[in-house]
Image: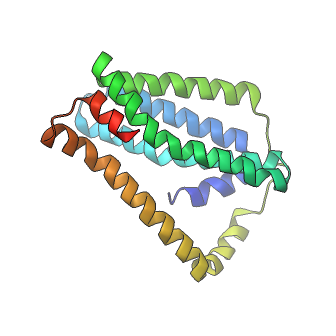
Amino acid sequence: AVLQLAVGPLSDRYGRRRALLVSLTIFLLATVGTLLAPNAGIFLACRMIQAVIATGFVLSRAVVRDMVPAEQAASMIGYVTMGMALVPMVGPVIGGALDELFGWQASFIFLLLFGCAIFALVWADLGETTRDGGVPFAEQLKSYPVLFSSQRFWGYCLAAACASGLFFAYLGGAPFVGTQIFHLSPAELGSYFA
C-alpha cells in the first residue's frame, strides 16, 4: 500500500496509461514467474511482486476522475470500488473450482490470460487521461506532513486498515482452517467465500 504514495505522482508525471501498462507488464511477468518457479522461495517472491504491483490498480479511480466531471466521478468511483470489493469474494470461488478441476496452476493461468486481456484493452482503448502533468512529486511530498498530522486522515486510515486487515487475515487463515481442520475441498472452501 505504501507504493501508492509513489504510483499516483508518477502517473501524474508520466501518464496514467503508461503507469497502467508498466504495472500490468510487471504483474504479467510475476504471474509467469509463479508458473515457472523452481522452488517455494521464488514462487513467494513472485506472489509478493504481484501483490505490490497491484497498487497500480488504484489508478483506475484516477482515470475515472480524469475522464468525467466531478459530479459523475463520485458515482463511477463507487462502482469501481464495489468491483474491487467483490473480487476478493468471487476470486476464491473461481480459484477453488479451477484448482479442483485442473490443479493449482490453473488459477495462475487464469490470472495470466485475464491480465493479458486487460493489457490488450488498456493498450487498444485507453488513451492518456492526464491533462497537465499534475503537481510535481517534490511539491506533493511537501504536503505529506500536513496530511500525516491530520486526525481525520488517521481516523479514516485506521478504520480502513483495520477492516482490510481483518478481511485479509480471514482470507489468509481460512484456507488452512478449512482444509486442515474441516477437510474441505478447494471448491467447497471457495464457495464459503461467496
Residue 27: give x, y in percent of width and height: 50, 36
Residue 49 found in image quarter: top left
Q: Is residue 62 left or right of residue 153?
A: right
Q: In this view, does 194 lie to the left or right of 39?
A: right
In terms of depth relative to the viewer, which is nearer, 46 or 121? 121
Residue 156: give x, y in percent of width and height: 56, 71
Residue 19 found in image quarter: top right
Q: How many labels does the image show?
A: 0
Q: In this view, does 124 lie to the left or right of 85?
A: right
Looking at the picture, the colour scheme in use is rainbow
Residue positioned 69% across, 30% down in the render: 122
In terms of depth relative to the viewer, which is nearer, 148 or 192? 192
What is the residue that sits farthest to the top in this orientation?
102
Residue positioned 83% across, 56% down in the render: 70
Asked if residue 134 can be seen in this view, the reply is yes
Q: Is residue 140 left or right of residue 46?
A: right
Residue positioned 86% across, 51% down in the render: 69
Residue 74: give x, y in percent of width and height: 74, 54
Asked if residue 14 can be seen in this view, the reply is no
In terms of depth relative to the viewer, which is nearer, 122 or 163? 163
In terms of depth relative to the viewer, which is nearer, 186 or 172? 186
* Figure check: 26 above or below 121: below
Q: In which quarter of the image is the C terminus?
A: top left
Residue positioned 33% across, 54% down in the render: 169
Residue 140 found in image quarter: bottom right
* Figure check: 124 above or below 88: above
Residue 111: give x, y in percent of width and height: 46, 28
